[in-house]
Image (cartoon, helix red, strand yellow):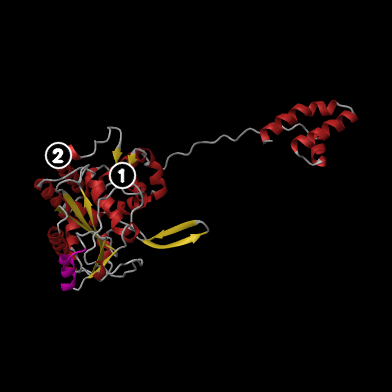
Amino acid sequence: MGKKTKWEYFRAIYLRYRKASMAEKTQILEEFCEVCGYNRKYAIAKLNGPFPAPKTPAKRHPRSSQYTSQALSILQAIWEASGYPWSVRLKALLPLWLPWAKKHFAISLPIEQQLLSISARQIDRRLKARKTQLKRRLYGRTKPGTLLKHHIPIKTDSWNVTTAGFTETDLVSHSGNSEKGEFVHSLNLTDIFSTWVEARAVMGKGQIGVLDAMHDIEQSLPFKLLGIDSDNGTEFINYHLKTFCDQRQIQFTRGRPYKKDDNAHIEQKNWTHVRKILGYLRYDSPPALHAINDLYRNELGWMMNLFQPSVKLVKKTRLGSQLKRIYDQPTTPLDRLLASNCADPAKLEKLKRLRAGLDPFKLSQIIEQKLDRIFKLANYRHSPAPPSANTQTDDLSPVE
């Protein structure tokens, strides 16, 4: 019996008990103890005591919002311009973006203080309505290869590197709804230590095209390439890439077939840096190939590596049936390299000057403009149906 029911029952028998005879009181008392589960002495004291007045709930005054609507609108604008990062990463990038945000929005000192003081939990609450519109889809079309498998060792242990240069790589297909014919793939490579990402578009899965893209990526990296870990696709398991690694003394390893967890770092980057950007459309023309490469080599690479903080998993602890993950502080890949001594100082200095002169809001606008042109080059005959007007595909889960 709940408190409210007990209260109503007590009110009903109270006056009857006070006016009853001794025999009737005994009967009412025993019934009261049995119904409400009270001790006899407690029930006698309650029935013989003064009739208690019902408690009136205290009037709660709603708390005034600590964050103004203007501050929240600016927060949402930064969130959208930065590619919808999750709350912890968004909080980390606010100090980096605010100097540029002041040039685009009227930001007073109180608003700046609100933006810098807002917590990740409050960011989640304030942006919750917007996030409910989002959805995700993932798929892959990698086929395993058998050539040279016995020459390339399998790596199943966790990455515990303390220097830049050890990477994971993968191909992301842009085939749309049809695997027939030749279409564009994105060769994606991420550094385990710094989370630096480089991507290049290649036509088809030819071994020479993948090798040329790997050459281009190697030249663009601000650190020496020390290791490559791939899946078992023939685009990677071939003599061309093995010779490339042997000549440069690059460690070449592979994951187990059908075990995507062996390449968890690059699988996550495939979503945030490729699929989320280009979607699931089919690209199969040279103009689309050149347009995607232009985006990868310039604005998108700068945005992701210079202005987007990422987090790294430090350790996992199990508490009973629950697994607790502990991450480091969100940091941009460039800042991770600057804090270490494992990258080319000349390239790092050039990147620092580049970031100091780039406006991330204008960078975001240019990315959107280039994406509009790329989407027009898609083959819509063999692409998934576009989403309805009231849905939008973005990513908000914690990234690495």
> Callout 1, which amino acid?
Arg
Percent across and percent down for residue 301 are: 20, 55
**Along the viewing direction, whichever of 137 and 232 lies nearer the viewer:** 232
Relative to residue 364, is residue 13 drawn left or right? right
Q: State how far apart marks 2 and 1 are (Cα).
A: 21 Å
Q: What residue would you read off at disc 1?
A: 137
**Along the viewing direction, whichever of 82 and 149 lies nearer the viewer:** 149
Q: What residue would you read off at disc 2?
A: 376
Q: Judging from the image, what secondary structure is the residue with disc 1 in?
A: loop
- Between discs 2 and 1, the one toward the N terminus: 1
- In the image, which is nearer the foreground, mark 2 or mark 1? 1
Q: Is residue 186 visible?
A: yes
Percent across and percent down for residue 125 are: 41, 43
Percent across and percent down for residue 300 are: 20, 51
> Mark 2 Cα within 10 Å, few/some/many (few <14, many 20+)?
few
> Callout 2, which amino acid?
Lys
Residue at 16%, 64% in the rendered image: 218
Q: Is residue 347 above or below residue 305?
A: below
Q: Please state, as top left, top right, bottom left or bottom right, where the C terminus lies in the image.
A: bottom left
Image quadrant assignment for residue 355: bottom left
Q: Is residue 54 visible?
A: no
Percent across and percent down for residue 207 are: 15, 60
Write the start and end of the magenta stretch as one range. Answer: 237-247
